[in-house]
C-alpha cells in the first residue's frame, strides 16, 4: 500500500484512471434505436441540405425589383408545391408564382413574400410590402454533401438523430454499450420491500448508480448485495469481471475493519489509487480486478452519486471517446453561508432561485453524506475550492443536477 497514491486530487485521480482503457467494439443500429447511444464514427452528409434553393414560407415568389415600391400588383403564372415544378416555370418581370413551404424556387425569382401579406383577385396578386430575399433557403446552407456533421463519440439526442436522417442514414454505427456491474456491500443492507430488523437499512445506492449509468448511455447490471465476508466478495467480483466491462462497488472502501473492498483490492487486486481530495466522497479507490477496471465508491449515498459524476463519468466518457452527456455548469451568487474544506474540493447541495434577474444559490438542507434527500431536493452542487473563504454574495460555479 505504501507505493499506491493516496489522498490525491480529483484531477490526478482522473488522469490515473483514464490511463486504463478497455477495447471498444461497435454495432450498426437503426435510427429507431439510436436515442441515448454514442456514435461510433464520424458521419459525413450524403446530401446537401437543403438539396435545392427552396421557400421558407407559403406565399409568392417574384423578382425583388418588382416589389420595391409597394403595393405592387403582379400576374400569377403558376403554382409550385413542395414536389416542385420549377423546371417548367420561369418568372419574368411583372410576374409571380404561388409557392409552398419547402418548394423549389423557380427560375428568375429571387425573393418571397408570405401569403398573409398579399391579396389575390383572379390571376393577380397585390403585395403589401417588399419581397424578402432571406425567405429563400439556399442549397447546402445547412449541410454540404461530404461534410462531417456529427463526430465520433457524439451522444445521440433526438435532434441529432433527426440530423442523421437528414443526412440520408437509415442505420448508423454506434459504440457497443458497456455492461457495468454494480455491487453493494454490507451486512446491514436489505432490498427495498423486505422487512427490516434493528440495525438494517434499505439498499439504495445501486438504484441511483444504475440511473447514472443509463444517463451515460450504458447498461447497468445490478448484482446481489454482498455481505461482509472476503469469500463472498471475491466470488461476486470474479463473476462481475467475466460478465462486465466495468465494476462499481458501493461501500467497504474506508479505513474500518469491515471495509473489505479496500482490503481485498490491497491484497488480491491491482490498486491504482485510494482516497481523493473530494468532499463528500473522499475514500474511493480505483484499479483492476482480473484485468477488469473497478471503482470502489463510498457507501454513503450522496458520496456515491458525487464520486460517480466527478470521477466515474469522466472515465466512461474517455473510454468511449464521448464528451457527452456532460455536467452542465453555470455561475450563481451565494445567498447563504457555505463551508468548504482546507484541502479538498467541496461540493455543497443548493437550491437555485432567480431573484431580480440573478441566479442565487441557497444551502437549505443539511449536508450529511448519508442524506440522499438533500440531492433529491436540490438543483445544483456549488463547487468550492480548497482553502478559500467564501462570502455571501460571492459568484461561485454550480453544477446543475
Image (cartoon, helix red, strand yellow):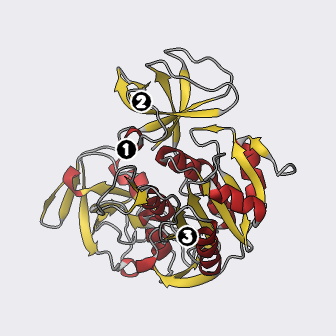
Could you tell me which residue is drawn at 29 percent across and 60 percent down? 195
Q: Are marks 2 and 1 in contact (CB under 8 Å)?
A: no
Say few, some or many: other residues with alpha carbon within 10 Å of mark 2 (under 14 / 14 to 19 / 20 or more). few
Report how far apart the C-alphas of labels 3 and 2 lie in the structure: 31 Å
Give the x, y percent position of residue 62. Answer: 35, 60
- Circle nearer the viewer, 2 or 1: 2
Q: Earlier in the sequence, mark 3 or mark 2?
A: 3
Say few, some or many: other residues with alpha carbon within 10 Å of mark 3 (under 14 / 14 to 19 / 20 or more). many
- Circle nearer the viewer, 3 or 1: 3
Q: Earlier in the sequence, mark 3 or mark 1?
A: 3
Q: Which residue is mark 2?
A: 366
Residue placed most toward the observer, 315 or 92: 315
Give the x, y percent position of residue 14. Answer: 72, 51
Under circle 3, the secondary element is strand
Could you tell me which residue is drawn at 32 percent across and 56 percent down? 196
Q: Is residue 382 visible?
A: yes
Side (left or right) of 4 relative to 368: right
Q: Which residue is mark 1?
A: 376
Report how far apart the C-alphas of labels 3 and 1 lie in the structure: 24 Å
Q: Which residue is mark 3?
A: 181
Could you tell me which residue is drawn at 40 percent across and 69 percent down? 105
Under circle 2, the secondary element is loop
- Give the quadrant of the C terminus: top left
Amino acid at each position: 500500500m505504501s507505493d499506491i497514491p493516496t489522498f490525491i486530487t480529483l484531477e490526478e485521480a482522473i488522469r490515473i484512471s483514464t490511463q486504463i482503457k478497455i477495447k471498444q467494439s461497435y454495432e450498426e443500429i437503426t435510427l429507431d434505436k439510436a436515442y441515448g447511444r454514442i456514435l461510433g464514427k464520424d458521419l459525413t452528409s450524403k446530401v446537401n441540405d437543403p438539396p435545392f434553393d427552396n421557400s421558407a414560407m407559403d406565399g409568392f415568389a417574384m423578382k425583388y425589383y418588382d416589389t420595391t415600391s409597394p403595393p405592387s400588383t403582379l400576374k400569377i403564372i403558376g403554382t409550385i408545391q413542395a414536389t416542385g415544378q420549377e423546371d417548367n416555370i420561369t418568372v419574368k418581370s411583372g410576374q409571380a408564382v404561388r409557392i409552398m413551404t419547402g418548394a423549389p424556387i423557380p427560375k428568375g425569382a429571387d425573393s418571397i413574400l408570405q401569403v398573409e401579406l398579399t391579396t389575390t383577385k383572379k390571376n393577380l396578386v397585390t403585395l403589401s410590402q417588399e419581397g424578402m430575399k432571406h425567405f429563400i433557403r439556399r442549397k447546402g446552407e445547412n449541410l454540404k454533401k461530404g461534410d462531417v456533421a456529427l463526430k465520433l463519440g457524439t451522444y445521440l439526442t433526438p435532434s441529432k438523430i433527426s440530423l442523421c436522417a437528414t443526412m440520408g442514414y437509415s442505420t448508423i454505427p454506434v459504440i457497443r454499450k458497456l455492461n457495468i456491474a454494480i455491487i453493494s456491500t454490507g451486512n446491514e443492507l436489505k432490498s427495498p420491500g423486505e422487512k427490516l430488523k434493528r440495525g438494517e437499512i434499505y439498499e439504495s445506492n445501486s438504484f441511483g448508480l444504475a440511473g447514472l449509468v443509463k444517463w451515460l448511455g450504458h447498461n447497468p447490471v445490478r448484482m446481489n448485495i454482498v455481505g461482509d465476508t472476503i469469500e463472498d466478495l471475491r466470488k461476486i467480483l470474479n463473476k462481475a469481471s467475466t460478465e462486465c466491462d466495468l465494476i462499481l462497488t458501493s461501500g467497504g472502501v474506508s479505513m474500518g475493519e469491515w471495509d473489505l473492498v479496500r482490503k481485498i483490492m490491497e491484497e488480491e487486486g491491482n490498486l491504482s489509487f485510494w482516497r481523493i481530495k473530494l468532499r463528500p466522497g473522499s475514500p474511493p479507490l480505483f484499479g483492476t480486478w482480473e484485468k477488469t477496471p473497478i471503482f470502489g465508491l463510498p457507501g454513503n449515498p450522496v458520496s456515491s452519486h458525487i464520486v460517480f459524476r466527478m470521477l466515474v463519468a469522466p472515465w466512461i466518457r474517455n473510454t468511449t471517446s464521448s464528451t457527452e452527456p456532460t455536467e452542465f455548469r453555470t455561475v450563481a451568487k451565494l445567498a447563504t453561508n457555505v463551508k468548504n474544506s482546507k484541502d479538498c474540493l467541496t461540493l455543497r447541495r443548493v437550491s437555485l432561485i432567480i431573484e431580480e434577474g440573478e441566479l442565487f444559490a441557497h444551502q437549505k438542507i443539511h449536508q450529511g453524506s448519508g442524506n440522499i434527500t438533500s440531492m433529491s431536493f436540490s438543483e445544483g452542487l456549488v463547487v468550492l475550492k480548497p482553502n478559500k473563504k467564501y462570502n455571501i454574495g460571492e459568484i461561485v460555479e454550480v453544477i446543475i443536477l
